[in-house]
């Protein structure tokens, strides 16, 4: 959202005659040298003459929380679906994670909705209870839900050397392994190397649409949101973005 805002703001400023640095990326005080001492500037134009552009290998977050929780959440979501799991079925959950995940989101007692977004324990408990971790799962009511708080006490986060080695070898592998021990003694295990939504584990078009509608319908209503969704699906055929957008958002 902030990137889109900056682009629109830049266009308006340019209309008013504002100017800026001509070498914003590669200049002596440009973005690249703000990141590293000796940047590889050739990367800026790598593959530009091919169809292997970075915009086509973007990641999309299916869950409204820290990305480091997403591998575990996808595993729990899949196991919940396959075995019809409910919080009452759970004896214990072990989450095996890398060092960064352990450092950032190992928070067994979040106090606020924002804190819940950075608690892998809360997010995992919410996934088991609701089957999804969207905006609605980070309300004040959910954060203080007694069933969720009880379930969180049965979740253990374990810094695991195998997960750490995966991440060290490939930084895109924000892997987690989930072990769910059920009350009946059965143990369910699943490891996810690439979080759902990454290019290696992509969301389907239908899943992307479902996320969009869940966010857009409360703001625009179902009819407008559906028009927007259908417009994006055929964006390549659009000749006038402003006109098409107005048509999508017109009142009934």
Image: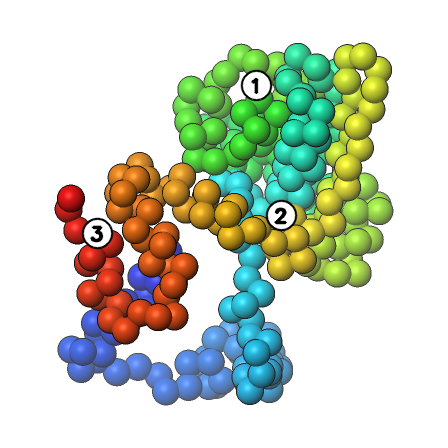
Q: Quadrant of the N terminus?
A: bottom left
- Which one is nearer the viewer's eye here, 90 or 139? 90
What residue is rendered at 67% in x and 58% in y?
200
Q: Nearer the viewer, mark 2 or mark 1?
A: 2
Crowding around mark 1 (Cα neighbors within 10 Å: few <14, some 14 to 19, many 20+) is: many
Rendering coords of residue 51 (x, y %) = 57, 78
- Residue 11: mark: none
Q: Is residue 121 in view?
A: no
Distance from disc 2 to disc 1, alpha carbons, whole Å, reads 23 Å
Rendering coords of residue 85 (x, y %) = 67, 21
Crowding around mark 3 (Cα neighbors within 10 Å: few <14, some 14 to 19, many 20+) is: some
Examine the rendered structure and indicate whether residue 170 appears above or below residue 190. Answer: below
Distance from disc 1 to disc 3, alpha carbons, whole Å, reads 39 Å
Instruction: Specify the quadrant of the image occupied by residue 170.
Output: bottom right
Crowding around mark 2 (Cα neighbors within 10 Å: few <14, some 14 to 19, many 20+) is: many
Q: Nearer the viewer, mark 1 or mark 3?
A: 3
- 189 left or right, relative to 141: right
Look at mark 2 in the image and give the residue it sits on. 196
What residue is rendered at 21% in x and 51% in y?
249
- Residue 249: mark: 3
Distance from disc 2 to disc 3, alpha carbons, whole Å, reads 31 Å
Dot 3: element: helix
What residue is rendered at 20% in x and 65% in y?
243
Dot 2: element: loop
Rendering coords of residue 91 (x, y %) = 75, 16
Dot 1: element: helix
- First in sequence, mark 1 or 3: give its number: 1
Look at mark 1 in the image and give the residue it sits on. 148
Q: Is residue 66 in view?
A: yes
Cβ atoms at labels 1 and 3 below 8 Å apart: no
What residue is rendered at 66% in x and 12% in y?
88
């Amino acid at each position: 959202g902030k990137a889109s805002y900056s682009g629109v703001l830049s266009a308006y400023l340019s209309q008013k005659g504002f100017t800026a640095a001509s070498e914003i990326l590669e200049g002596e005080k440009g973005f690249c040298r703000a990141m590293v001492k000796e940047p590889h500037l050739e990367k800026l134009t790598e593959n530009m003459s091919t169809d292997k552009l970075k915009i086509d290998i973007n990641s999309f977050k299916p869950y409204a929380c820290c990305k480091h929780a997403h591998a575990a959440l996808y595993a729990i979501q899949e196991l919940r679906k396959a075995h019809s799991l409910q919080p009452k079925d759970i004896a214990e959950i072990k989450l095996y994670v890398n060092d960064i995940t352990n450092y950032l989101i190992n928070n067994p007692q979040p106090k606020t909705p924002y804190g819940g977004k950075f608690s892998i324990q809360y997010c995992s408990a919410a996934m088991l209870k609701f089957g999804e971790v969207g905006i609605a799962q980070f309300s004040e009511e959910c954060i203080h839900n007694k069933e969720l708080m009880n379930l969180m006490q049965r979740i253990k986060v374990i810094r695991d050397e195998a997960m750490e080695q995966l991440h060290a070898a490939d930084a895109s592998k924000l892997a987690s392994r989930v072990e769910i021990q059920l009350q009946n003694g059965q143990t369910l295990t699943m490891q996810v190397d690439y979080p759902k939504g990454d290019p290696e584990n992509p969301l389907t078009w239908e899943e992307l649409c479902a996320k969009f509608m869940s966010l857009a319908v409360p703001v625009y209503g179902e009819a407008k949101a559906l028009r927007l969704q259908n417009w994006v699906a055929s964006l390549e055929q659009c000749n006038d973005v402003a006109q098409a957008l107005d048509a999508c958002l017109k009142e009934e």
